[in-house]
Image (cartoon, helix red, strand yellow):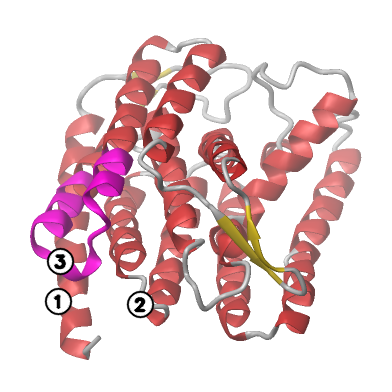
Amino acid sequence: MTWAAILRHLVFAAGLACVAAVVVRAMVSAGVMDRPAARKAHTVPTPKGGGVGIVVAFLLGISVLYGFADFARLADAYFRGVVLAAVAIAVVAYWDDLRDFPFVVKLGAQVAAALLAVGTGLYVEVFNLPLLGRVDLGIWGAVVTVGWILFATNAMNFIDGLNGLVGGTVLVACAFLAVIAAGQDGWFVYFAALLLGAAVAGFLPFNFPRARIFMGDVGSQFCGFVLAMLGVAAARFQTIEMSFLLVPMLLAGVLFDVAFTLVRRALAGENVAQAHRSHLYQVAHRSGVDFRAIAAVHWGFAAVGGVVALAFTHAGSAAKLPLLLALLVPQLAWLGFVVARARAAGLGRW
């Protein structure tokens, strides 16, 4: 790809960011308010649904991609399945922002959307593993892919509780994913990551550091779903062993927080589907850590994941496991810090 082409793509992305900003600004005035509650961090009513701007800008960009960027198109069936599923996620999530559905309803909609996307045949069929080589998953690949989509979608939704945390994390992850995909000639992943990053860039100034509007479920679930599907597409990069781990590495901070919290609550006998304030980022905030610092930490996690993922694409088989283990170091350090802060603040069992 030439520098002139990259410049054209960046100019197009900047235009999409402006589109997202215009829509988000309109949503600020739409009057859909998120009221303060015991499990929420904000103390004054604040508009929500800013993720609508992300959805509109991304879908506009993906329409241009489908119509004009032949070099970056997926097979039509895959493309339609992913786009329709993403739209379904966004519509139900925005309706949830308005109505506040029970978790089981949201989960049902996510399952339907995941099945719609996977039903086109876009799922992880093969794991290329060190020593073992090619492992054909067969139909279990579809099951694993659905599980991954649901976990990533909900993880991004669960982590959306502080200004800028999700928006900044997605922006950093998309920037690295676009670079990695370009290096692998994965042009659909490259372009889609660029589009999602641009859409989030248009939203972020309205949410950080002062929140004039929240992303809402429509934004967090949509971002999680799109990144999950890009992870599935990236798993097909043939020249990288374990390429299915690229997007999970970029989202390591989000996935670690959610996985740790779910396991801890399950072992404590708590209802994991019930709303709570015991995610690590929430405990850190409750113990007195500034929300801007917490957001910056998670942006850093995404950046570290991006650097490791870039190294991963060039590393030999023997170096891949140490690289994966290296991602745990900042997560464990953050866990230790949050536990110490919680104890000092007298939060007890959180």
Residue 250 rendering spot, x and y as whole percentages: 56, 62
Name the one closer to the observer, 196 or 38.
196
Quadrant for the C terminus in the image:
top right
Q: Are marks 1 and 3 in contact (CB under 8 Å)?
A: no
Rendered image: mark on residue 185: 2
Q: Amino acid at mark 2?
A: Asp
Residue 6 rendering spot, x and y as whole percentages: 22, 80
Residue 80 is a magenta residue: yes
Circle 3 Cα neighbour tier, 10 Å, few/some/many (<14 / 14–19 / ≥20): few
Left or right: 207 in relation to 147: left
Circle 1 Cα neighbour tier, 10 Å, few/some/many (<14 / 14–19 / ≥20): few
Circle 2 Cα neighbour tier, 10 Å, few/some/many (<14 / 14–19 / ≥20): some
Q: Is residue 170 above or below residue 92?
A: below
Element on which disc 3 rests: helix
Residue that badge 3 annotates = 70
Q: Amino acid at mark 3?
A: Asp
Q: Is residue 289 visible?
A: no
